[in-house]
Image: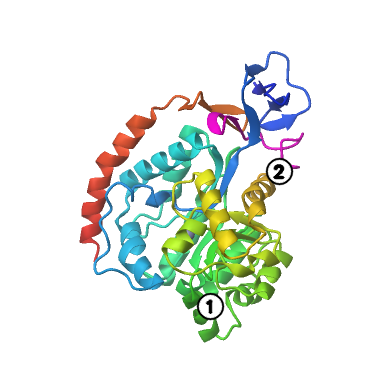
Amino acid sequence: MIESLTIGPDKTGRVVAITGGRIVAEPLAGAEMLACPDGVIETGAVCAHTHLYSALSPYGMPAPQPEPLNFLQILERTWWRLDRAIDAETLSAAARLYVAEALISGTTALVDHHESPTFIEGSLGVLAEACEAFGIRALLCYGATERNFGAAEAKRGLAESARITSGPRIRSLIGLHAGFTVSDDTIKAAADLAQRRGTAIHIHVAEDIEDVEDARRRGYAGPIERMESLGALVPGSVLAHGVHLSAEEVALAAKHKCWLVQNPRSNLRNRVGYPYELWASPRVALGTDGWPANMTDEQRALLQLAAMHSDDGAEKRLPAGNQLIAEHFGAATAGLERGGLGDLVIRVDGAVRHVVVDGRVVVRDGALAGHDIEAIRAEAKAVSSRLWDRMARVA
Ligand SMILES: [Zn+2]
């Protein structure tokens, strides 16, 4: 049976009908009704780059020792230790927590970039299961890399991205960690795989100056030119960060219909700089890079930083994420018009009241449908101490 839902009218008089997951002109007879006379219907927020596996980190992750002095040391002493400690149980708890918190904050779609080098095969299945359990929309990938176990590790990473089967709310991208941890052959293999599967690539680009210098040492003008010459600027690809790109490189990514994603809180904490040249592309979305996917918080941080850096293009980045998701899920529009995805949020005085994804109510009256957020937080807390023990034993 095709599901049909009618929402509204809201306090502006707007009514949205969704059938089969898409916004339609008229609901089917007998459609479920969701009233919201005191609320406002808005498109759901999109987090265009994140890492579900890091969701347990606020639950007592030990501080790195000694304190990192640069970006590479932050990766080596924190995130590359955490990802090697992840197993199926801790990944599941992290993903469930992340997805649940994202939905109750009004985020309806996530673009995840996953790595767990000692648990590669099956890891995306764990993420897909968590997304399905709560009903969020997601683009998943495994960030293939050679940094732990060489070329064989990269092959296994690419195969894991290809293992995801598409569903109404799940699609796969082909992931690469970052240019500086993969060879040209791996980049080419990722591009071929993305083309063959009719999808695109998800990679960190120029987050730190080291990624740019690495591309130059390999004989390229920079990471974007390297990807272009290897055929890896596949249309629809998600290039996270772009902090150290020139305006010409940003424009080149846009010419290939690639997306860039700004992650303001992460960039600030990692002290990698502000992505000044992102103005040169209209295809720039907003991500959290592992911070909770509360896009109201991320947007606030973005606007503050943008004002400090005289960046007047920042307002467009959060809604641009809806366009990214619409393209990957084949929707005719990114808005609340006919043909759009049935992903929306009803807010009352700014607070999230109901959340609908793919025409299904996943948050009702501020609470997850069919799940208890306190139980999920308790589960996360219980599992996290085991994760910190495992992390302490990572060589
Ligand atoms: Zn990232």
Residue 146: image location, x then y, percent? 42, 70
Q: Taking the image as drawn, is residue 85 in sight?
A: yes
Point 44% across, 36% down: residue: 100
Disc ID at residue 334: 2
Nearest the viewer among 218 and 287 is 287
Give the SS element for disc 2: loop
Q: Is residue 99 in the magenta section?
A: no
- Amino acid at dot 2: Ala
Disc ID at residue 34: none
User: Circle 1 sits on which residue?
Assistant: 212
The quarter of the picture where the C terminus appears is bottom left
Q: In this view, does 68 lie above or below 215?
A: above
- Amino acid at dot 1: Val
Ligand 1 within 8 Å of the CB at mark 1: no
The quarter of the picture where the N terminus appears is top right
View extreme (top): residue: 30
Residue 321: image location, x then y, percent? 63, 49
For the residues bearing labels 2 and 1, Cβ distance under 8 angstroms: no
Task: Tell how many labels.
Answer: 2
Label 2 – label 1 distance at C-alpha: 33 Å
Give the SS element for disc 1: helix
**Magenta part, dominant SS:** loop
Residue 8: image location, x then y, percent? 67, 22
Q: Taking the image as drawn, is residue 239 in sight?
A: no
The range drawn in magenta is 330-354
* Quadrant in the rendering for residue 145: bottom left
